[in-house]
Image (cartoon, helix red, strand yellow):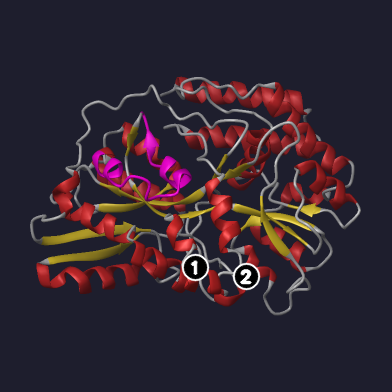
Amino acid sequence: MRSRVGLGAAVAACALTVAACGGGSSGGGSSGGGESTSVKGAKVIDAKSLDNPPKGTIKYCQGKDTTGIAHELIKDFNAKFGSQGYKATLTEFPASADQQRAQFIQRQQAKSDDCDVFSSDVVWTAEFASQKWLYDLTPYIKAQGDKYIQAPLETVHYGGKYWGVPETSDAAFIFYKGGKAPSTWQQVYSEAKNNGGIVYQGAPYEGLTCDFLEIAYAAGGKVLSDDGTKSEFNSPENVKALQFMVDGIKGGSAPKAVTTYMEPETDQSWASGKYGFMRNWTYAYAVGNDKGSKVAGKFKVAPLPSFEGGGKAGILGGHNSVISAYTKNPGLALKFSDFFASDAFQQKAILKFSQAAVIPSVYKDPSVQKAIPYADQLLQALSQAKARPVSPVYPQISQAIYKNVNDALAGRATPQAAVKKADQQISQALSTF
């Protein structure tokens, strides 16, 4: 899902691409990546095909271009390569992530070349790859070496292969007023209790899956087995993480109302000045500094903290360029995808459109350091993140998590019962594929 968000006060009018929410952990749990899952018979890209592909036009498809970056991308690509006989066009799908996914699936099922390159949400990789709708880009990715931040690269990794080129990314921050950044989640909740509380996204939707997994992964929890075929959700670590969140509401560290909060309600609560802490995506930096916000200029941000006895974690968002198996010019499609991920365009993406770059070198550029007040913290947050569970049935997995976690937060189920029920529903979803 693409939504209008900003990366900093200096670029508050711009927008950052997010994928409903983002993923990972630098210590503790694993999302489960389906490593032993094989996709046999998929078309494999020739890494050298981008150097001199057949002349022609490729069609790039994405959701509604609310930021303007897609039009800029097309313009810049055509300006650079038009004289060589290469051109790209843009097709915009509806803003809804579900509608974007449906539009792409419809075309792939019809074996259409309407979308040579598609801007895919990070959680769709496994589903599309397992259907053999995408080119296997492993040769290209391996030729790139260490160009990318590792975490965003993992969002195109499935079955031991790479199925896309990272476009943009996103991760969450802890927002806090003054003082020193808390080093653990326990410290966040302890200090929040005496400083107005912490607000986050606790409503039953994708955002809560992200919020929960950030703490669960840090506590050492998992969702799936390493091969992605079995649920490992019913674990002491996940129960501990959920009990921690439940106790936070019961003990007054977080308001009961968070069980109904999505991003807009979280933003409004934070801007009221009532709360001392907030968990939210990077876009909220600009929102918090908007005119009329009572916290403007009064807060700082930090990457998500560790969980006592565990590690640090973050959930990754973003989009990737995936190449349709039905394109008639895979080399030109790869050339376009490679251009999006180039140093020059990635720098423009973050400076002009406030979209988090997937290349670490961009964050060290003096112009980026000057324009983005928290460039170093953003790079750290992205680097310590991982993808959400990589599975063809991810939507069902996420629903099992957020519905049952919300039941526990709202007091309708114990953490133990909620985790057990979610585990059963995840297992059922996995059995259908």
Q: Residues within 10 Å of mark 1 (few under 14, many from 20)?
A: many
Please tell me which residue is depicted at 73% across the width and 50% down the height of the picture: 260
Circle 2 — which element?
A: helix
Circle 1 — which element?
A: loop
Please tell me which residue is depicted at 55% across the width and 66% down the height of the picture: 5
Residue 174: give x, y in percent of width and height: 70, 54
Depth check: give the residue in front, 347 or 259.
347
Q: How crowded is mark 2: few (under 14 residues within 10 Å), some or many (20 or more)?
A: many
Q: Which amino acid does label 1 sit on?
A: Ser
- Asked if residue 150 lies in the magenta stretch, the reply is yes
Depth check: give the residue in front, 84 or 57.
84
> Residue 286 got which mark?
2
Proximity of marks 2 and 1: CB atoms separated by less than 8 Å = yes
Q: In this view, does 419 lie above or below 136?
A: above
**Which quadrant of the figure has residue 25?**
top right
Is residue 330 found left or right of 234 in the rendered image? left
N-terminal label among 2 and 1: 2
The magenta segment is: 139-159
Please tell me which residue is depicted at 80% across the width and 64% down the height of the picture: 178
> Residue 354 got which mark?
1
**Which quadrant of the figure has residue 325?**
top left
